[in-house]
Structure formats: structure tokens, C-alpha cells
Image (tube, helix red, strand yellow):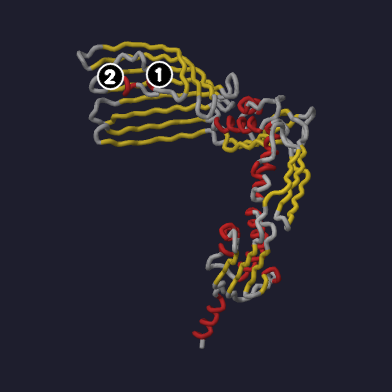
Amino acid sequence: MLRHVCAAWLLCAMPAVAQDVRLNSEAARGALNDASLLRALDDTAVPQDYIAAARADYRRLLTALYAQGYYGGQISITVDGVEAANIAPLAAPDAIEEVVISVDPGRRFTFGNVQIAPLPPRTTVSEDLGPRRTARSARIQAAVAGSINSWRDLGYAKARVVGQSVVARHEQAKLDVDVVLDTGPSLRFGPLNVSGNETVSDDRVRQIAGLPTGQVYAPSEIAAAARRLRRTGTFASVALSESDQIGPGDTLPINAQLSEAKPRRFGFGLELSSVEGLTVSTFWLHRNFLGGAERFRVGGEISGITGETGGVDYSLGGTFTRPATFGPDTEYFLSGEISREDEPEFLLDTVALETGFSRILSDDVTVRAGCWYSARAGRNGIGNTPIHAADAAVGRHIGPARCADKCQQWLLHRPQRDALCQY
């Protein structure tokens, strides 16, 4: 008796799922199938899930029809023969056998009279809204968004839609669209209001951002300012937004919400080779060294420990960079390194120092100019001959730094030069 009671309880506790969810439609089956929540349910769904999904599918399927240009469609969703819209959300049946989605898309519409006004100077309504083009709703949205973005690019930051009329003429299968825009006044950049910064001063944030206060508004300048702030590595998150209210003199204040990253970071590495021996390296990094988003990194390496290719080599170097020096896209850099290389062919001690400026012209092009000095002392393996040399150079290059730029006067032959010149 107890065994029968337990079996009956388990049967009642199991979810009763639909055996079949069918979609009947003569057109746009792919779009409808992708939009339907019912078609996405799996075997773990319970009857309440099917009822909720069915009620939501009316709007989702209608939106999918609009996106394909069907504005006279009829949708019916039945759950065991009962229209889902007539089933209360909390009155789901205990079991569901069949769900049927029936869609009659009707005729496909094309555009009729389309007007978006006012349009930016020297622009016309997109050809995608022409009289013989399918009246897809996404095309209307794209045309309106494109017009607003064009106005914003011209300095009208508050351009917006203030009126719209969409009329479907079912007898002609035409869609008439009338959208009215309000451009608002032409605006100039107002002050940059900074919040969230803890150790970097507001003035330094404004210098790094380089927002052109007083100039005509341009969305690209806001994107560039955010990119400069992120490039420093000092901030974990950067968000620039426009003020809701227009400031005095048709100016638009910009709000910068920042979150600073942890300033310090360190790391180390170990590498073991049966020929070259053990290599130990480490570095220490500070992302806000002097309180103005300066970056300072010190690193060292010892290699050739117990190796078979010579003695022990070591290097110790540091790099200091300061963003927004003589302009928001110009960075000052100072780097130095001391090293010793103990090889079977030579022993060389080197001290190198480099300083200068780098300017970012675009995401792919950087101009770098500065001066470099290096002093070397040691001996080669031929007769234990002493080596003493010093080099100094002033130059520039475009793009990534290259080793050859700094080795034009190297005294050793090419294989040793390539091995010793590390940038």
C-alpha cells in the first residue's frame, strides 16, 4: 500500500509538459520561429511557463511581422484548443497536450509617402524608404536614428523625435510614415564635471581628457576623451555622459564618472632551461606615481644561472611616462637600464638612458621623438681586448619602436648587435 502511494505522489510531482508546439505560417517562418518564446522552451518547462510564453508571444510575433513588412497579420495561439489570451496567467491547466501557433501574415507592404523633417543640410531620405521598397520597420528606425546622429554630428546634441505618424493603407498595401524632429539649438562643449576620482586631481583628469571646452559639440570628441582616460591605465572604469540640461550660453556640460584602479601591481617569473639555466624576472608597477596618472615601472632579470652558455647575465631598468604633456595626445617618457652580459665571446656592461615624447595621431600611428645615450665597457673573447664605447642619438620614428633605430652605430658584428639591442 505504501509503495502505491509513493508512486502516485511521484507521478503528480512530475511537470506536465507540452507534447508539441507547432507553428503554422505561410511566410516569415524563420523570423517568427526566432521571435517565439514558446518555440524556445525545453523539456523542463511547466504549464505555467507555456501560458506565460504564449501570452508574451502575441506582441513578439507581431513585432516580427512588422520587421518583415507585414502590417495586416492575424495571430492565434491555442493551448489545447483554447486561445491563450483567454487563459489567466495563474489558471494554467495541470497538463498541456498541444500548443498551436497560427499566423496569417497577410500582404507584404511597401513604403508609400515617407517624410522625415527637418533633415540635415545636403541630405535626403534614404533610398531604403523608396516607394517600391519593402516596408520593414527596422528601415524606418535606422533612417530616423541616422538623421538624429547627423544632426548631433553638426553640433545639435539634443536632436530628438517630437512627433510621428505611421499609417498602414491595407487596400494598397502601403505604409505612410511621417516623423517630425526637433533639432534644438547648436551647442558648444561646457565644463567637464569629474566625479569618482580619489587620488588623481580634477585638473589632471581634464588635461588628460582634452575635451575642447567652448568648441562646437561633436560626439567624436567625447569618445576621444574617454579613450584618452582609459589609455592611462589609472582608471578601472570611465563613463562620459551628456548633461540633461543645457547650460548658460548654449553650452552642454559633460559628466565624467570614474573609478580608479588599484595603483600598484607586481609580478615575477621563473624559467628553467637545460642549456641556458635558470632565469628569474620580476617587475613592480605604479599606475599613479605622482598623483597625476603617471606610470612608473621597474623590472629586473637575472639569467644564465647554472647555465652552459656563459656566465650570469642581469638587467635592471625602469620607465616613467606622463600622459597629457604638451597636449592630451602627447606623452613624456623617460627610461633607463643597466645590464651585464657574460657570454663566451664577450663580457659587456651597458648603461642606457632615453627620454622624449610620443604623440598618438590615430589608433594605428604614433610619432615618437627623443634622444638616447648609451655607454658600454667590457672585453671581447679575442685576446681579451677591452671595449669602451659611448653612443648618443637624437631622432624620431613613426609607428612602433624598432630595435634597428637604436643600433645604427653598434660596434659589434651583426649577430651580437641583434642579441644585445633590446628595446
Residue 181: image quadrant is top right
Q: Is residue 69 above or below residue 193?
A: below
Give the crowd class for mark 1: few <14, some 14-19, many >=20 residues within 10 Å: few
- Front residue (pair 414, 194): 414
Q: How many marks?
A: 2
Give the crowd class for mark 2: few <14, some 14-19, many >=20 residues within 10 Å: many
Residue 251: image quadrant is top right
Residue appearing at x 51%, y 85% in the figure: 4
Residue 323: image quadrant is top right
Q: Is residue 416 above or below residue 50?
A: above
Residue appearing at x 31%, y 11% in the figure: 388
Residue that badge 2 annotates? 347
Disc 1 is placed on an element classified as helix
Q: Quadrant of the C terminus?
A: top left
Residue appearing at x 53%, y 84% in the figure: 5
Q: Position of residue 46 (x, y in %)?
A: 58, 70
Q: Position of residue 82 (x, y in %)?
A: 66, 74
Residue 136 seen in the current view: no
- Front residue (pair 44, 164): 164
Q: Are marks 2 and 1 in contact (CB under 8 Å)?
A: no
In the rendered structure, the answer to whether residue 171 lies left or right of residue 329 reads: right
Return the disc, 2 or 1, that comes first in the chain's sequence.
2
In the rendered structure, the answer to whether residue 151 lies left or right of residue 225 reads: right
Tell which tag, 2 or 1, sits nearer the viewer: 1
Label 1 sits on what residue type? Answer: Asp
Residue 233 seen in the current view: yes
Residue that badge 1 annotates? 405
Disc 2 is placed on an element classified as strand
Label 2 sits on what residue type? Answer: Leu
* Label 2 – label 1 distance at C-alpha: 24 Å
